[in-house]
Amino acid sequence: MSGSCKGEAAGARADLREIFISFAKIGAVLFGGGYAMLPLLEREVVNRRKWCRFEEMADFYAMAQLIPGVIAVNTAMLIGHRLRGAAGTLAATAGVIFAPVLVILAYAAAFDRMAENKLLLDAMAGLRPAVAGMMAGIAFTMFNRTRKTRLGLAVSLCVVLLVLVCRISAVLVIVAGLAAGTIRYALTLHKLKKRHEHIR
Amino acid sequence: MSIFAKLAWIFFKIGLLTVGGGLAMIPIIQYEMVRLGWLDNQQFLDILGIAQMTPGAISVNTATFVGYRIGGIAQPGSFWMALAGALIGSVAVCAPSLICVNAFGAFWQRNQGHPWISNVFAVLRPLVTGLVITAAALLVLEALWGGQASDIMTRPRAPDILPAALVLSAFVLTAFTRLSPVYVLLGGAVVGLLVGL
């Protein structure tokens, strides 16, 4: 990790309200999940606020994928953390989820009243298959990337077999995956050590 | 256990188990919501569509929506209970990352290239692919055969033309073009409206 954000480097602390407002703006136009966030971050955090350089922000973005949770929220938290520590993470998180929570609240409140509305039911009847097809498209694209390595092909097919066919819980599968990755790491270490002894 | 405590715990768990971001959450949320009877597969498709068409992450959107409903069930007719549920769900799903960033933020930054992390992710990435395939398969079954999706293996029959055409078009547009999902989904909703007229 190189350098630090400008706010810290200059000794000037970013205003918590500014952090909240900036991320609220990003959150309000954050469509299509975390992957769409980078250009938005660049415009607001790098160009307008000048809180960090683009490379630093890209590092945060990469790191956000290693922390449990949503990439968009994690990226916001990491930048908030760098700017103002724990208070910064809270301001950034509150900001980035502010607009989405309001929109869904409005939807949920309206849904109760419009549950029998014909227009809504018709729109939903068209929306549902579109969502399913979109998910299938995403799955297809992901699998095309994954199947290129033997490990990727084996793991992804095993997971489909276990969860879809054998009905094993997704939670269990993820925990098992963490364990398998750790064992894989231990095996590499072991092999390296052996090779080292062999040379000596 | 109080319903709110359970709500907080379930979404905390979902937040904690989401590795590799965004899409990885879908199958976990689907599994947990259906298991608990908080959403059925059709409602899950609805909320997934809404989540994709409105700003914000799917998991936070689902947490807000389900929290609102659970709060409303806890005390029917009370907007404030529903609001409390919505906020509890939304905060709970973000809480694990909030704790991680604050507790290990500096540590993660120093150890980003550690071989343990790269090994774990070498397994987790294809695992997430498998989960997304599973979720997609279940959602397609639900969209094509609705409530009868579970017995389609024993009593096979053709799906309705319209949902099948919509599933296929959305699949092609997503897999082979760079069209934003917002338009794919809006298109589906518009077709639904037109056919309903």
Image (spheres, rainbow, N blue to C red):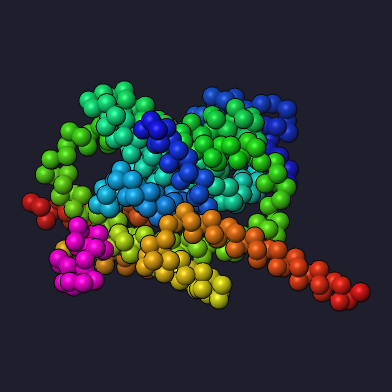
Residue A163, magenta (yes or no): no
B190 or A64: which is nearer to us? Answer: A64
Residue A158, position as x, y percentages in the image? 47, 70
> Left or right: where does residue A28 sit relative to residue B158?
right
Residue B7, position as x, y percentages in the image? 39, 36
B69 or A107: which is nearer to us? Answer: B69
Residue B144, magenta (yes or no): yes
Can residue A70 be seen here? The reply is: yes
Q: How many marks?
A: 0
Q: Which residues are magenta?
A: B141-161
Residue pictured at 43% horizontal, 41% vertical: B10
> Left or right: where does residue B5 sit relative to residue B47?
right
Q: Quadrant of residue B188?
A: bottom left
Can residue A160 be seen here? The reply is: no
Most extreme residue toward the front, as rendered? B1
Residue B21, position as x, y percentages in the image? 50, 51
B161 or B84: which is nearer to us? Answer: B84
> Left or right: where does residue B13 sit relative to residue B142?
right
Vertical placement of residue A23 versus A37, above or below: above
> Left or right: where does residue B43 sit relative to residue B13?
left
Residue pictured at 63% horizontal, 36% vertical: B102
Most extreme residue toward the right, as rendered? A200
Residue pictured at 70% horizontal, 44% vertical: B107
Residue A164, position as x, y percentages in the image? 37, 65
B6 or B47: which is nearer to us? Answer: B6
Vertical placement of residue A30 versus A197, above or below: above
Where is the C terminus of chain A found, in terms of image quarters?
A: bottom right
